[in-house]
Every structure is written in C-alpha cells, then in structure tokens.
Amino acid sequence: MQSLATDPIAPLLPRLHARARRLTRSPDDADDLTQETALRLCQALARTDQINTPDAYAMTVLHNLARQRWRQRKPTEALEDDMALTAPAAPART
C-alpha cells in the first residue's frame, strides 16, 4: 500500500472535488463524481498505464463523467408516427 507521500491521488482530491462542485448541482453529486474519478484513476494506475500527468488525466475523466451524467439526465420525448410528418416549407402551387 502506498503512503500519502507517494500517493498521486490524495493531493488531487481537493482540486477534483472543487471542480466537481462547479460541474454538478448538489454536494452529493460532486462527492460521487469525485469518488468515481479517483477510482478510475486508481484503476488506470494499477494497470500500469503510462499516465505522465495524473492531475490532467483525472480532470479529463471528471469532465467526461460529468458530461455522461448530463446526457443521461436529459429528458427525451417518445417519437410518435405523426411526428415524422412535416408541413411543407412553402405553400402548394395551384
């Protein structure tokens, strides 16, 4: 187990959380986003991926996770058959 002195994630947590707070609507969502980002960074480092700048990597992961959550929350409307028809752009010639 790594000590705090050699842990690349511990110093990033305050910055990650501050960024997550700006990207989310609630403190709980920011906590979840920060935790998920830290987990993904740990997993990437454990796979011995070549991550030269863990802070930039973590910020990118954080932003991508936030965008993914925004897309999942976007309400969608079911398409109906009559929605596929569009009115003509110009009046019909007679």
Image (cartoon, rainbow, N blue to C red):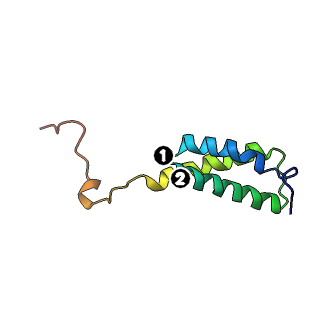
Q: Could you tell me residue 12's position as x and y percent?
A: 74, 45
Marks 2 and 1 in Cβ contact (< 8 Å): yes
Q: Residue at x 29, y 55 (%)?
A: 84
Q: Relative to 49, is 66 on the left or the right?
A: left
Q: Residue at x 77, y 45 (%)?
A: 11
Q: Residue at x 74, y 42 (%)?
A: 56
Q: Could you tell me residue 78's position as x and y percent?
A: 32, 60
Which amino acid type is shown beneath numbered disc 1? Answer: Arg
Q: Could you tell me residue 89's position as x and y percent?
A: 25, 38
Q: Quadrant of the C terminus?
A: top left
Which amino acid type is shown beneath numbered disc 2? Answer: Asp
Front residue of this view, candidates 12 and 48: 12
Q: Quadrant of the N terminus?
A: bottom right
Q: Which mark is residue 34?
A: none
> Which residue was labeled with disc 2?
29
Query: What's the distance in space between the residues labelled 2 and 1, CA to CA?
Result: 7 Å
> Which residue was labeled with disc 1?
25
Q: Residue at x 23, y 57 (%)?
A: 82
Question: For the residue labelled by badge 1, is the local secondary structure a helix, a strand or a loop?
Answer: loop
From the viewer's perspective, is residue 43 above or below residue 22?
A: below
